[in-house]
Structures are given as structure tokens and as C-alpha cells.
Image: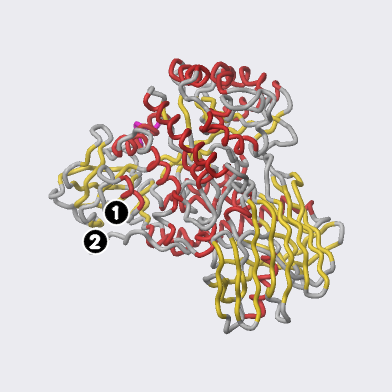
Amino acid sequence: MKTMPATMFRLALWATVSGLAVSAASAATETFSVIMGGRNVGHLDVDTSGRHSRIDFDYKNNGRGPTMTEELDLDDGGLPVKWTISGATTFGSKVSENFALAGGSARWVDSTGPGEARVTRPSVYVAQSGSPWSLGLYARALLKAGGTLPALPGGTLKLTRGEALTVTGAGGAVPVTAYTVGGIETQPETILLDAGNALFAYITPDSIIVRKGYEGEEVRLRGLAEKWSTDRYVAIQKQVAHNYGAPVRIRNVRIFDPATGTLTAPMAVLVNGRTIAAVEPDDSPATPGEVAIDGAGGTLVAGLNEMHGHLGQDSALLNLAAGITTVRDMGNDNAVLDTLIDRMDAGIIGGPRVVRGGFLEGKSPFSANNGIVVDSEAAAVDAVRWYAARGYWMIKVYNSMNPAWVPAVVKEAHRLGLRVAGHVPAFATADQMIAAGYDEMTHINQFMLGWVIKPSEDTRTLFRLTALKRLPALDLQSAPVQRTIQLMVDGKKAIDPTVGIHENLLLNRDGKVAPGAVDYFDHMPVGEQRSLKKAWIDTSAAGDDAAYRGAYDQILKTVRMLHDRGVFIVPGTDTGGALTYHRELELLTQVGFTNAEVLKRATFDMAKYMGADQRLGSIEKGKLADFFLIPGDPVRDIKAIKSIAMVVKDGTFYYPAEIYPNFGIKPFAAAPAVTLPK
């Protein structure tokens, strides 16, 4: 459904899941280019007259993107006193946001509903559904205020000064200074301000929004964003990664055994270096020089496998804190991912091990800008060879691929020992891709669309999502449905349904906490909480609300049918993993899995699926020390995996209670007691 790293994902969903908006500059007109994957995919234009600014923000990548218009008035201090935002988010939900400040009284309406506050000191409203230009506005206000400002609806905005540099382009050389703006979301955002403190660029390692005429600086600026981000995570890693340099004995823990689906009696697990040195009775004597960790009767579970990631530096450590020690990456900037893997494997920054999927897309006006984009069958086959030569585990085919090229792609991939998974390319059907040799289908909507759309309808756009409202009228016992499912059974195919992203898409509504986030909502910073109370799609037309809800019911029934018929279900999220992966596992219990089966599927089964079960997937002597500690019993209550006290990856110990404050997240469990040798 999406194929982008976390930082690009945040930008691509700006009007859905972020929350920064816009105003004010000294220039009468400012124009910016939105660049993703080396392509100019949209614009951000600002017209200012006095204290009033009008903003037009629009881009389209992978066939979708936000369209926003904003009107903004500032006071003498450069703070918003009136703000209106209208348009549509990336997935189409309508936006009608407004803010007004008068007589010390602030009132606003966003997707969470109306709000108001008495303002007794300078404060800044952080808009939920605006454009990134607001970052410049916030930075100017923060500079005047000394670096921090109370934010509305809540929290505190913080500004940190970074490096100074000079950029060149059509307008000549421009000296700029880097700043990060944070305190509201889980991640700070990086911008460049010019000498007059006007916004010059918003930058991430994957994409940029830059002043028009300076697009040629894209590669350099993305590189700098990546370096600065790395510096931050290197510092965090030094703070939170514990390598004790001695054997570590974890006492009084029960171990989830995937072979039996049960918990053991209280045991002791001994870690030496990267591996599990022993699994012993709890009363086994310690040896001199050991570190002791009190498991307090909790449960050890082997590391989880997130099977549909688009891993970025910003999501790496959060995945690890959630007990995810392996991520199958399903599409990325190949060079960026290689660098990230090198850093994680070396322990420079924290994150999971990565199994790489080679993203393969056909060239079209709707192409996703990741991996390798091809314009011929020969180029597609060459891309398969390129991926195979670099140790990729699989190929992922995407929306704009010519369906006629897929058999050749599959043949070459299989010849070279790679699996093939993917979307159903536009103007093709799941039946055709199964016949072409897919080993695994990606996304339940891709699998089901062929039952409800016409051969001529184009799924390279948001239609591949909005067409789901046709599902309630579908007879799941009909011949076309049963034929496709039987093809999956007969071909021993797997499916990565990503149920949770469809729950977000079809059930999230403005003003209500997303169903999948109810267990962690209160732990998140205020900006993320607002995002978790926002719809993804437009349900305003008559009948659409019920249709989308009915579509989700049909999706659950279909996944249950697949499971009941023996089709292998692969657990992945496509929403960044971390806390959303816990929800994905929870949803599998709604389609026929027991709690123990879910745990086995997420641990041992996935390790075996990827050929790594000899060293991962269970807690046994000689295997890599990849596991996590929870206070509860996940066999009785699958929600217990959401409260993690400790994560071990490759023998390095992490305590989420130390990690989460770096992201503005309240920890879910206290760290265990650790006793160092005397």
C-alpha cells in the first residue's frame, strides 16, 4: 500500500498523521519544490501581504498526496491569531481546521473536535493539518522566545540550533542555518532558515521541500539530514545500549516455547556475548563475574519479526523497543537502507536486523520512487539480477509494473533463489499474479480488488483504496472468490494481509481514538494523540461510512477464510511497525489464531520462513540472544506483549523505559533490576 521509509512516510501522510502548519515571512512570495526520489512531485507556494499569508500545498507521489489551502494572520510578535486550513489529506479525508485568538481567548477546531484555552503568556498554535511551512514560523517565534514556547492544544515546542552552511542555486549563494523543531511529535523536524530567518528548506534523509531554484542541492541536503539524524541516534545509542562485557544471567523468567505453545516453569537464561549460553533451572548457581537481572516472574519471548517494514533511521530504535528484532524491508532507497543496516549491525545506532526485499516498479506517471523503476521487461530482469547479486532475499513487484513482464521477473528470481511477492499491478488480477508465480501476495486489498473492480479501472491511484467500499456487496462464497482462494491453497501461496493498516483506513474517524491505538494513546505526545484521532479517508458522502465499515468486516472474513483453508498468513504492518505491530498480532486473534499461534507465527514461524530458524525464533542454547521480557503472560492475554521491560538483540540489552523519553513517549513498563558483579 505504501512503499517508503519512515521519514518519507511522515511527509507523505503529513496531512493525515503529522501536524505542523504555516504562516509569515518577510517576502511577498515564496515558492518551494517538493522532491521525492529525485523527482519534483509538487509545490508549496506562499503569498504574503503584511501580516496575512496564503499557502497552497500540493504534491502527488505514488498516485496520492495532500492538497491544502491555508489562510493565516499574525500578531505583532509573529504568532498566529487567525488560521484556516482546508483541503484533503493524502488518503482523501476532508480537512476543515480553524484557529482564532482574541482577547486572550484561543479557540480552535481540528479533527479531534473543538477546543479552547485562556492564553496568559505567548503561546503558539500548532496546526494539525497544515503544510511544513509552519516550521519556519515556529522557529522564528521560538528564536524570539529563547528556544521554547507553550503550544496549543498542549505541550511545549522546542528549538535547537544546528550547523551553518551555504547553498547555491539560481538565486546565487545563500547562507543558511539548520534548526530542529520538536517537543510535540515523536520526532524533531529539521529545517534550514536563511539569514533573515525565512524558511529555506525542510529536509529529511529521503525527501526535501526546498526554495525554488535550489533543487540541485537535493542530494547534498538529504545527505546532511541523514548525517544530523545519525548524530542524534548515535548519542541515544550510547545512552541506552548496554553491553556488560560479562555473562548475563536473567533469573525467574518463564519462556514461551513455540513448539508447545506454552510457558515453561521459572528458568534462568544465560547470555554470553551475542548468544544464549544456557537455559537452566532457575536455582542453578551463578558463576563468578556474572551480571544478574531479576525477571520478576515475567515472560521471555523470542524477538518478533515485522514482515512489512519500510525501515528508516527514525523508526529503527522504536521497532527494537517494541520487541521487534528483525524487519523484512519491503521497499526503500537501496543505498540509504544499506547504510542504515551497516550502522545497526555495527551497533553504532540501535535497530533490528534487516531482511531485504528488492522493490521493483514500472515507470509510469504514478510510479513510486523507491528501489528500481524499470521501463522494459529486460530492465526488470536485470534489476532482479542486481538484487540477487547483493544478497536480497526477495523481490517485491509494485503497482505500475507491466503485468506481462511478471512471469519473466518470477522466473529469473526463482532461478537465483529469490522469492517474489507484491501488489497486483494495475489492470491485472490476483489470479494472474498467482499463475505468474508469486510466492506471496501483499495486502488484503490488493488480493480482493479483482473481485469488485472492472479490468479497465486503474489501481495506481487512491482508487485502490476507495474501491473497497464495494466490498459489502460481495458474496464471499461466489465462484470468483472461491477460485482465487483455491489457487492460493493449491499453489501453497502465502499472504501478507496487513490487516491493521486497513483497520486504520476504514475505521478511523475524526474525533475518536483509532481502534488500534487505544492501548497506547495515553502514552504518546500531544501531536501524535491528535493524529490518532483523525480519519484517513473521506466518509462524508451518503452511505460511505457504513460501506467502509462493511468493507472491513468483509476483509476480516476473507482473512479468516484464508487461514481456515490453510493459507500461510505473514504478519506485517506497512505502518512503521513498533507499536502498530502489536496491534497486527492482536488482530490475527480475530481471524482464528490462538494467542499461542500468533506468538509462534511472529517468532519461530517467521524465522523458519526466512531460513533463519537455526539461529533465531526461539530461546535455546546456542541461538542468538534475541528476545524480550514482559511482566505478563501473552498466552493468556496477547495484549501483554505491549508492556515490554527489556529487549535483547545480538546480546545487547535495551530497556524501553530509557528509550521512550527520547521520543516523548511515556514508558509502558519499568526496567528490571540489574545487579553488576562486585
- In the structure shown, which secondary structural element does the residue marked by tag 2 occupy? loop
- The residue beneath circle 1 is 246
- Amino acid type indicated by mark 2: Pro
Residue occupying image coordinates x 51% and y 42% = 501
Q: Are marks 2 and 1 in contact (CB under 8 Å)?
A: yes
Of 29 and 315, the residue lying toward us: 29
Tell me if residue 494 is in the magenta stretch: no
Residue 304 in view here: no
Residue 499 in view here: yes
**288 lies above or below 362:** below
Q: Quadrant of residue 379?
A: top right
Colouring of the image = secondary structure
Q: Where the N terminus falls, by quadrant?
A: top right
Residues shaded magenta: 612-616
Of 325 and 278, the residue lying toward us: 325
**164 lies above or below 270:** below
Q: Say whether residue 77 is left or right of residue 585.
A: right
Q: Position of residue 274 (x, y in %)?
A: 35, 45
Q: Position of residue 529 (x, y in %)?
A: 50, 60
Q: Residue furthest front?
A: 542
Q: Quadrant of residue 24?
A: bottom right
Alpha carbon distance from label 2 to label 1: 9 Å
Q: Around disc 1, counting alpha carbons within 10 Å, would you say few (fewer than 14), some (14 to 19), or many (20 or more)?
A: some
- The residue beneath circle 2 is 677
Which comes sooner in the sequence, label 2 or label 1?
A: 1
Q: Position of residue 186 (x, y in %)?
A: 52, 60
- Amino acid type indicated by mark 1: Ala
